[in-house]
Image: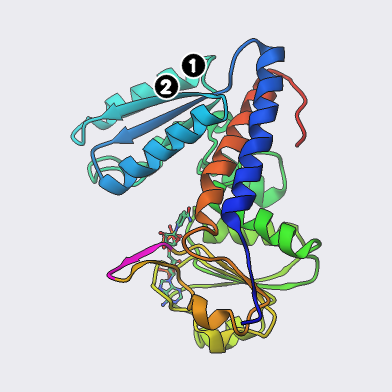
């Protein structure tokens, strides 16, 4: 074994701690805590777990967490009305509608209804556009968490070859944008990519966001590469990532484990985004 194991759990704990300290200062100046509203529609068990842990982390960071649970058959208009009310509520700095939504609801209609300046998930097309052109906005939590781990591990990323596997709007595409902004040479691979192993072979940085257990093989990796595994796959053997972790340990320079790598970063960055939203809305200067 040669690779370092990137401890996302510890990094996320440190980030949550820094956020909590800034929340205390914010509350002193603004006379209120930052507020995050989380909306859960239906009773998908995985979504319920995510929403519960987001609520717990929000409160632990000293923020107000307001949870709205709507039945699975809620009419789309009722959900849009709730989003409108949260947009107008001055105590709410961040709005998150847990995805996926039931089939009768148009996710785009809901995502675009959220005020972009309260869109702490960064899924609104306005925020995707801001990221693409380099304007301040909100960046999706998971890829921003990956970037934080990469910069912590590697420092300056300028000039490095990065391969992002996956092109979803919530992980792959924003990850590629962030790496472009860091002056990496970025390749985005997906299900139509020809000869994925040889694409991965040239990467100094590999970000795997596919959702296929242990798809990325150790033999594909360039020796010394930094590997960020976003995948969360439930298998009979337990939770595994998109990368053959055990094999990667022998080849990579550093690799994130699953669990304990990228996963804990997502909620920590959500708290950070909510705090930044609150600071912007109250004209309080934070630390960027
Ligand atoms: P999506 O299903 O939206 O996207 C998967 C991407 O992988 C698609 O772009 C798809 O290509 C590509 N893909 C599928 N099969 C292959 C293949 N054989 N070779 C190359 N590329 C392939 O998933 P998400 O982006 O939402 O999530 C990806 C993974 O990350 C999942 O395991 C998810 O659970 C996890 N995740 C983890 C989070 C965390 O907090 N740690 C947060 C969000 C996601 P195409 O576009 O051509 O179909």
x and y percentages locating residue 121 in the rendered image: 52, 41
Q: Specify the quadrant that holds the C terminus.
A: top right
Look at 50% across and 62% down and name the residue there.
Answer: 230
Per the rendering, the mark at residue 88 is: 1
- The relative height of residue 42 versus residue 282 in the rendered view (above or below) is below
Q: Specify the quadrant that holds the N terminus.
A: bottom right
Look at 60% across and 44% down and name the residue there.
Answer: 13
Q: Are marks 1 and 2 in contact (CB under 8 Å)?
A: yes
Q: Is residue 278 visible?
A: yes
Residues packed near mark 2 inside 10 Å, few (<14), some (14 to 19) or many (20 plus):
some
The colour scheme used to paint the residues is rainbow
Circle 1 SS class: helix
x and y percentages locating residue 151 in the rendered image: 73, 58
Taking the magenta stretch, the answer to whether it contains residue 234 is: yes
Q: Which residue is mark 2?
A: 84
Give the residues drawn in magenta, as a range: 232-236
Looking at the image, which residue sits at the far front?
A: 1
Look at 66% across and 57% down and name the residue there.
Answer: 149
Circle 2 SS class: helix
Look at 60% across and 13% down and name the residue there.
Answer: 32
Q: How many marks?
A: 2
Looking at the image, which residue sits at the far left?
A: 73
Between 186 and 211, the one nearer to me in the picture = 211
Q: Main secondary structure of the magenta part?
A: strand
Q: Is residue 112 visible?
A: no
Residues packed near mark 1 inside 10 Å, few (<14), some (14 to 19) or many (20 plus):
few
Between 160 and 131, the one nearer to me in the picture = 160
Answer left or right for 276 relative to 218. right
Taking the magenta stretch, the answer to whether it contains residue 228 is: no
Ligand 1's quadrant: bottom left
Answer left or right for 199 relative to 28. left
């Amino acid at each position: 074994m040669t690779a370092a194991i990137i401890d996302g759990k510890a990094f996320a704990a440190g980030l949550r701690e820094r956020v909590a300290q800034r929340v205390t200062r914010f509350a002193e100046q603004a006379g209120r805590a930052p507020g995050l509203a989380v909306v859960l529609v239906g009773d998908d068990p995985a979504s319920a777990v995510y929403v519960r842990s987001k609520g717990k982390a929000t409160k632990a960071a000293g923020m107000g967490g307001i949870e709205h649970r709507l039945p699975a058959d809620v009419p789309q208009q009722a959900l849009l009305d709730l989003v409108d009310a949260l947009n107008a509520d001055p105590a709410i700095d961040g709005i998150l509608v847990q995805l996926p939504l039931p089939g009768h609801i148009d996710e785009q209609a809901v995502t675009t209804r959220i005020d972009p300046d309260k869109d702490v998930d960064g899924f609104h097309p306005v925020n995707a556009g801001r990221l693409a052109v380099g304007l301040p906005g909100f960046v999706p939590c998971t890829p921003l968490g990956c970037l934080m781990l990469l910069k912590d591990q590697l420092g300056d990323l300028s000039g490095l070859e990065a391969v992002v596997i996956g092109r979803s709007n919530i992980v792959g595409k924003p990850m590629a944008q962030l790496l472009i902004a860091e002056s990496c040479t970025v390749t985005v691979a997906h299900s139509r990519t020809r000869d994925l192993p040889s694409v991965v072979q040239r990467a100094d940085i590999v970000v795997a966001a596919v959702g296929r257990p242990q798809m990325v093989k150790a033999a594909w990796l360039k020796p010394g590469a930094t590997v960020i595994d976003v995948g969360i796959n439930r298998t009979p053997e337990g939770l595994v990532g998109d990368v053959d972790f055990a094999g990667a340990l022998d080849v990579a320079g550093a690799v994130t484990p699953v669990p304990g790598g990228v996963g804990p970063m997502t909620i920590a960055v959500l708290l950070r985004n909510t705090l930044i939203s609150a600071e912007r809305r109250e004209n309080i200067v934070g630390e960027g």
